[in-house]
Image (spheres, rainbow, N blue to C red):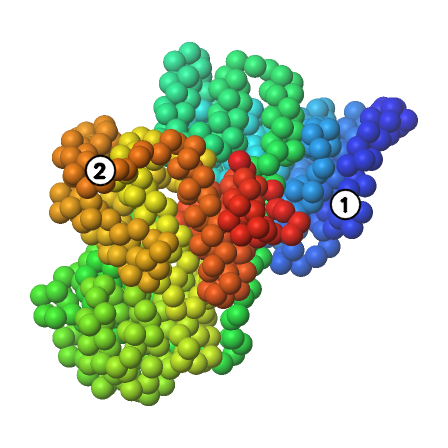
Amino acid sequence: MTDVNTASADLSRFDKLAALDPDEVVTHSYVRDITLPSGKVLALLTLDNGRDHTRPSTLGPATLLELSRTLDELRDRAAAGEIHGVAVTGKPFILAAGADLSKVGEIPDRETGLLMAQLGHLALGKLSTLGVPSFTFINGLALGGGVEIGLNSDYRTIDSSVPALALPEVFLGIIPGWGGAWLLPNLIGIENALEVIISNPLKNNRMLKAQQAFDLGMADAIFGPANFLEESLRFADGVITGKTVVKRKNAPGKLERAVKWDVAIGIAEKTLASRIGRVPKSPYKALELLKAAKNTDKATGFAAEDEALADLISGDQFRASIYAFNLVQKRAKKPAGAPDPKIAKKIGKIGVLGAGLMASQFALLFVRRLQVPVVITDLDQARVDKGVEYIHSEIDTLLGKGRIDSDEANRLKALVTGTVDKADFADCDWVIEAVFEELGVKQSVFAEVEQYIADDAILATNTSSLSVEQIGAKLKHPERLVGFHFFNPVAVMPLIEVVKTPATTDEALSTAMVTAKGLRKNAVITTDTPGFVVNRVLAKVLGEAMHAVEQGTSFETVVEAQRPFGLPMDPFVLLELVGLKVGAHVLDTHHAAFPERFFESAALHELAELGHIYEKDSKGKVKGVDKAAQKIVDKHRAKEATPYTAEQLRQRFEDGLADEIHRMLEADVVAAAEDIDLCLILGAGYPFQMGGVTPYLDRVGASERAFGDTFHHPKIVGVA
């Protein structure tokens, strides 16, 4: 039997941790005994916080302490022969969503962070020392610590309807610190573990569905939702009686440990460095732990997780990540300035002006998400047919990947039509243009279609930098026009900038916000100003970058100067991605609007004619600056120009951004600094670990230098 006094003393060292969250919504451990068909007794422990499914069960200090004590009792009962197995499951649809991040983000120091890591290991680790087989029945959402409950158990089953299972910690600036970094690679192999722990979090926090988790080996059996518990109990009975033998196909063997393990780690490290640079700490710390998991025992692996988690929890990047996480989880769901959604116009049919790639992507997204008829148009029938063909082929691709079934594929195809007759737009409730980025072109296509549509139909423009008000200047009803700016790739990027002009009605604005939500996008409302939010900030960075090289600063120095921002790509790769002609147009637009603060770049126009900046190998990897591109830049260098050092240029970037963002807020472009950060995170891939650009600018003193104040009071931790 366990010594009660010893157990209490063992847990008393966590009292400081529990005191940090006196209002914790405790996820209780409810136990009931179930007699299995064989006559064996299984103790079924259900995690339940007593709230409905809108409040996922989380694992705070009090929850973990209760779970630890419950498992001690079950170990004693197992030793007494009262039970022959233990299984953990959750309330309907939810196993556990990991730690309560809002509280973990308030951990004050490394010592307390270490206690949090150790408590998780202590509690969940008891699942492997009960003296009888332990199981986790993954019946619903499982994130972070919820997944680690299963990993610490001997066996796992999963409900085939589970919508999301993930270890998202790296996305948030920490690591799976309750066993995940050691247990997972030793269960499913290093390459699969790298995918789950590092690759998926860095791909916009990609989640696994049940079948994917099962195929990777994260569960030993998968059952349908109708009889999930009964089948799981039958599986457990088979294991306990020895009738069921579990074989794990992805468990690493000697060859993988001898050769493949280190090779996979090496490839992953090079990929990380090229994709995200070296500023974010958590991916590299996770990589270090995964590498060591090859030949360390569990106790050593868990101890290493404790130290790593303590370092990261008490560090700047995690606190910045929590700020960013709260923006995406809370502010994005309640957009500032959004009118009452009840006044939004109901959308029964959509028209898309244009049938090119961007327009076709819009049409596909609208038909798939809103499930309403979509009609596209262009200058001639051949272009229209090509657009419809593209949309149909993309639907076939979704079918081939199992994302939709054949009935839905046929239904979606039937909803998409093409025409060259604008009269076919007469019954559209929402019409969006995706034509050439030129004011006159956009004005003319809207003027033409307005002849046919109802007076209350909503018009939307996808312009990235033109004035929405000017686009609507020739409309009979300019009040119906809104900006609806997507980011590429349309299906993936989660942001839409919804732009209101002085004339835009609340009904039009509300319709745009409700439509964005229906598309499963996050919308931020911005006033009608050049570049709106994301492109105005990026134009500042790109303009400074081009100005610097025209001053004789090397491309390499410019890249080095902006590296601390943690942006997903350097300014010149970004220019090539969006298109050098588009980049030149964006800089021209901003220079025309704000000539004293935004540079025009004659060199960029010539580079656009050349078509590239970097020389690349056959696989598209950057080899260096193309000699012809360097000659163009050198030609435009002013005689008296002086190159910048990386440090000088970094401060120019920082102070210029602080000044420009402050001006944007003074002009009410958006409601608050948080909206600037939200736009850059969702629309420009600004990393969570940086916490948004405004906390960073506060942190490095740029805000004080630029306008004598800070964006946030008190200062929110950023990452220098």
Quadrant where the N terminus sits is top right
Q: Can residue 684 be seen in this view?
A: yes
Q: Which amino acid lies under the numbered mark 2 shown in the image of this protein?
A: Lys
Left or right: residue 274 versus residue 330 is left
Left or right: residue 679 versus residue 588 is right
Residue drawn at x 60%, y 15% as measured from the top left: 297
Looking at the image, how many numbered discs can be counted on the residues?
A: 2
Q: Residue 686 carries which label?
A: none
The residue lying toward the viewer, choosing from 58 and 632, is 632
Q: How far apart are marks 2 and 1 (CA)?
A: 63 Å
The part of the image, by quadrant, that contains residue 624 is: top left
Q: Name the residue under label 1.
A: 21
Provide residue 120's location: percent of width, then percent of height. Answer: 69, 32
Residue drawn at x 21%, y 66% as measured from the top left: 438
Q: Mark 2 points at which residue?
A: 639
Q: Can residue 244 be seen in this view?
A: no
Mark 2 or mark 1: name the one nearer the start of the chain: 1
Q: Which residue lies furthest to the right in this view?
A: 5
The residue lying toward the viewer, choosing from 540 and 231, is 540
Disc 1 on helix, strand or loop? loop
Disc 2 on helix, strand or loop? loop
The answer to whether residue 456 is above or below residue 430 is below
The answer to whether residue 201 is above or below residue 618 is below
Left or right: residue 536 versus residue 619 is right
Provide residue 709's location: percent of width, then percent of height. Answer: 59, 51
Residue drawn at x 32%, y 58% as measured from the top left: 595
The residue lying toward the viewer, choosing from 106 and 626, is 626
Residue drawn at x 49%, y 81% as measured from the top left: 343
